[in-house]
Image (cartoon, rainbow, N blue to C red):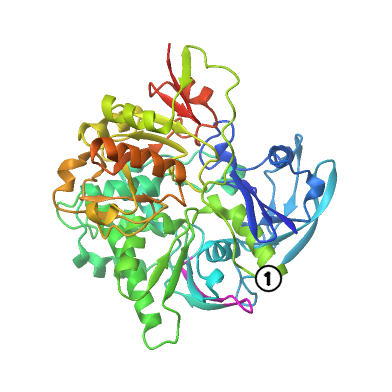
């Protein structure tokens, strides 16, 4: 059975699952230099993406559309997408509600008719947005393939943190309840209300429905927090303020106002960075405390999957992994809505087959578009991986690497990356200047998996750049460009099986330099998805050398 999952709102995309195997997952932002968080709002694009995979619309057995919320003031039990078009014709597509209600189940199916694709209208199913986060993350984890149950914590922007228990055979999902009443958008909204990230919201009502605000703030604020000091002693004040608020999407803004207004609860001398660091730390501690209370004396599995946009916060992920409650904490590389199309298709397949395990790999996004000729002003020549390693070692300059299929999720993991030596502290500034990013933004390391424990603490395998690690004594001086302001690094490890190309490159680079890692940051225009081809990278011109599938492109 071939299932096509669709996410039509922000972080739009399409995923194909055939008999439990992921064929591809294509995010709209990774096509044609689209802007970050691009909706899949033109349905004719669906047929184009399918055709690029050699699939006709008529080959698909089932279409699944991710659930969403209704515009404010409308019935949240019967949401309708109003921003989607088909060849310029405006549509009204009913979908499942955003989250399950008190009298419904997270995996409840909603059936509809009238999805226009390929010149005809199709039946389609839809599931709660919470369901795709839940099942997509669990299905991609190692647990169902081993017949193991797991806890799944889902915390996304428009929902409170909810804990589920998933059992694979027979498939059963039990909602264990909310951990605390705070929407996942609260951290980003809090930070966006402070001067470093404040910006007016001038979107239309339709745009607000398709694209929630502050999507780009949380990641920046997580890095900015390293400029401040986390004050756990202030947790009681935050508890008191938040405890006095009714659950609302304005809670983050309300907290920021309470802490910054004249005569408010802000402690003397606290900077905006201190406030951000403390609120981030507070939320992590609140997660840990709530999970500790749930696990105390309960017969629950010692395995935890994290899903939803909040699982991109490496500080919270690392805190939960090290807290001692769980034997294994697993996070997919696409915990936010970049994995929503995959998640929607996963729900359909799991319920149809009764087998939730998904066969997948992280490099299953869109292919690099082939270069029919050298870009204007560039010349190319053959260049194998060993020579690329030598160029990086001898010249010390960044190189764009575009190879094969793109990574799933928001992290560049070596197929759509800018790679550079990490041995000079100035490289972080060079890369941030090239990317037009703030100086406080970190640059991640990509490291050989078997060498990681020597360089990092804990240095455990982390192939998706989703946890942070300390740097072991002596190594911060050897690879200063990848050390963040707080002494940590957002590590990506690679082995030969998971990432053959990057593993070969690092192995060759290590032979020359003795250093088992490189700097790794995404290759893209500012505010856009990954470069889809060499021509886009050359037109950008931020880096002088581009390597793509055995050829090196340089200015003439």
Q: Is residue 250 in sight in this rendering?
A: no
The x and y percentages for residue 360 are 57, 55
Asked if the stretch drawn in magenta spans residue 169, the answer is yes
- Quadrant location, the C terminus: top left
- The residue at the point 38 percent across, 32 percent down is 386
Q: Does the image show residue 457?
A: yes
Judge the density around disc 1: few (<14), some (14-19), many (≥20) Cα neighbours within 10 Å: few
Q: Position of residue 527 (x, y in %)?
A: 46, 34
Q: Which residues, given as a range, are shown in magenta?
A: 160-173
In depth, the one of 479 and 150 nearer the eye is 479
x and y percent of residue 547 in the render?
A: 45, 28
**Residue under pointer 1:** 108
The answer to whether 276 appears left or right of 136 in the picture is left
Residue placed farthest to the right in the image?
120
Q: Is residue 353 left or right of residue 22?
A: right
In this rendered view, identify the residue nearer to me: 47 or 233. 47
């Amino acid at each position: 059975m071939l299932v096509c999952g669709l996410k039509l709102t922000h972080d739009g995309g399409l995923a194909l699952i055939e008999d439990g195997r992921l064929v591809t997952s294509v995010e709209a932002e990774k096509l044609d230099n689209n802007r970050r968080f691009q909706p899949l709002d033109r349905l004719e694009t669906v047929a184009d993406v399918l055709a690029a995979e050699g699939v006709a619309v008529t080959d698909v057995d089932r279409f699944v559309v991710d659930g969403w919320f209704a515009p404010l003031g409308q019935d949240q039990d019967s949401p309708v997408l109003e921003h989607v078009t088909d060849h310029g014709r405006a549509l009204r597509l009913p979908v499942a509600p955003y989250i399950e209600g008190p009298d419904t189940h997270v995996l409840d199916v909603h059936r509809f008719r009238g999805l226009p694709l390929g010149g005809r209208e199709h039946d389609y199913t839809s599931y709660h947005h919470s369901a795709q986060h839940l099942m997509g993350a669990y299905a991609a984890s190692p647990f169902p393939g081993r017949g193991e149950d797991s806890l799944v914590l889902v915390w996304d922007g428009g929902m409170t943190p909810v804990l589920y228990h998933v059992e694979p055979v027979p498939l059963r999902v039990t909602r264990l309840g909310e951990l605390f009443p705070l929407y996942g958008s609260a951290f980003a909204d809090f930070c966006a209300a402070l001067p470093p990230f404040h910006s007016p919201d001038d979107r239309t009502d339709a745009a607000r429905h398709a694209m929630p605000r502050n999507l780009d703030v949380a990641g920046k604020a997580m890095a900015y927090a390293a400029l401040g000091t986390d004050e756990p002693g202030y947790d009681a004040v935050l508890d008191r303020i938040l405890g006095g608020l009714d659950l609302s999407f304005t809670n983050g803004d309300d907290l920021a106002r309470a802490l910054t207004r004249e005569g408010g609860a802000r402690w003397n001398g606290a900077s905006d960075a201190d406030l951000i660091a403390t609120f981030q730390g507070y939320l992590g501690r609140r997660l840990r405390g709530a999970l500790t209370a749930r696990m105390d004396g309960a017969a629950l599995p010692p395995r935890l999957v994290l899903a939803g946009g909040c699982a991109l916060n490496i500080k919270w992920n690392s805190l939960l992994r090290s807290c001692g409650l769980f034997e294994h904490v697993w996070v997919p590389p696409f915990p936010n809505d970049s994995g929503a199309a995959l998640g929607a298709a996963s729900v359909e397949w799991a319920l149809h087959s009764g087998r939730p395990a998904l066969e997948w790999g992280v490099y299953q996004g869109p292919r690099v578009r082939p270069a029919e000729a050298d870009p204007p002003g560039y010349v190319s020549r053959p260049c194998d991986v060993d020579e690329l390693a030598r160029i990086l070692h001898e010249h010390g300059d960044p190189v764009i690497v575009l190879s094969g299929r793109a990574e799933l999720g928001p992290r560049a993991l070596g197929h759509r990356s800018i790679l550079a030596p990490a041995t000079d502290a100035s490289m972080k500034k060079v890369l941030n200047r090239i990317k037009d990013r703030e100086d406080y933004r970190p640059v991640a390391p990509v490291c050989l998996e078997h060498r990681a424990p020597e360089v990092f603490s804990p240095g455990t395998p982390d192939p998706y750049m989703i946890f942070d690690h300390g740097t072991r004594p002596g190594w911060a001086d050897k690879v200063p460009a990848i050390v963040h302001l707080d002494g940590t690094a957002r590590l990506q490890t690679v082995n030969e099986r998971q990432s053959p190309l990057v593993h070969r490159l690092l192995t060759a680079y290590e032979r020359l330099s003795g250093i088992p890692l490189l700097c790794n940051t995404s290759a893209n225009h500012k505010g856009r998805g990954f470069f889809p081809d060499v021509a886009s990278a050359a037109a950008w011109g931020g880096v002088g050398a581009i390597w793509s599938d055995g050829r090196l492109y340089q200015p003439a």
